[in-house]
Image (cartoon, helix red, strand yellow):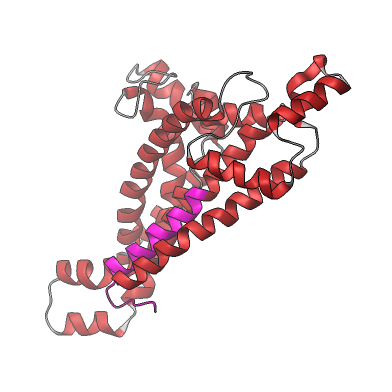
Amino acid sequence: MLAYILRRLLWTPILLLLAAFFVFFMGTVAPGDPAELQLKNRATPERIEKLREQLGLNDPLPIRYIRFIGNALQGDLGESYTYLGKSVTSLIGPRLWVSVQLNIVASVIALTIGLPLGFYAAKRQGTSRDPAIVITMLVLYAMPVFFTAPLLILFFAVQLHWVPAAGWGGMFSTQVILPALTIGIPGAAIFVRHMRASTLEVIGQEYVRTAYSKGMSDFVVNYRHITRNALLPILTLLGFTMAGILGGSLIVELIYGIPGVSRLALDAIFQRDFPVMTAFVLIGAVMLVLANLVIDIAYTIIDPRIRLN
């Protein structure tokens, strides 16, 4: 297993360099002159050419890419075209941490609700509880965010006064409860469906029937033989959830007034702020590569029989 992990670690920088190249190339071929976008109404041919020379935009593409990688390794992703004088890192950093905290809490809620319910529904197949759980979670999943969020605000914040209706005070404040529930409940529905299907597939295996025939207790069979094997497909789903942490809370952050990355990303798209957009795509690519690495390693930990050579 150690050799496999080392190989995956050696491949990770190569994948990140390839992802960075495609991100940089997209920002290069995107419509609009960066110098003209930065100068806006002060743009003249002379000023545009002077700024292009200062920014190094007239250099060959390989040199610009190497410079981009060197700066990115030092945490420098350039300056925003919209917020003049502001570095992309200083703009994204605090907002990214807010979105990460929100999605961590939402993921914990989704896993805490989804995995036990999915396992319970599978174990109760053939009874009325199984379809009741599945149908309830599907209804919750089908409800759009712009309906569930105001509903939660109206009930828990306006009527009961249990939690604040909006704002942000950190992942351990009461302000995180409603937005985390808004994201986590639909996520729980997804985990219920996948956990139920995976558990049903494992329950039908011969080694589970053999374990029962040997007189093992339900707890031992459920934990050692069913749950651990049923979790393997869930890891892949969890990996995509981790990688999509930037785009999964756009509407929720806007509704609850959370100062995350969603508003900044939306503004960057409409205002063609290419350094900020490039940074978001690059961060998403890095998170996807690292999430796959973590999930591949977790496979070998949960199921020692897996040996990828």
Q: Main secondary structure of the magenta part?
A: helix
Coordinates of residue 18 in the picture (x, y in percent): 59, 56
226 shown above or below 18 = below
Res 94 quadrant in image: top left
Left or right: residue 287 versus residue 104 is right
The magenta span reads 286-309
Q: Nearer the viewer, residue 276 or 72?
A: 72
Res 216 quadrant in image: bottom left
Which residue: 50% across, 25% down? 90
Q: Residue most toward the right?
A: 45
Q: Quadrant of the C terminus?
A: bottom left
Coordinates of residue 53 in the picture (x, y in percent): 75, 30
Coordinates of residue 62 in the picture (x, y in percent): 68, 50
Whether residue 38 appears in magenta in the rendering, the answer is no
**Residue 98 in sight from this viewpoint:** yes
Which residue: 51% across, 30% down? 89
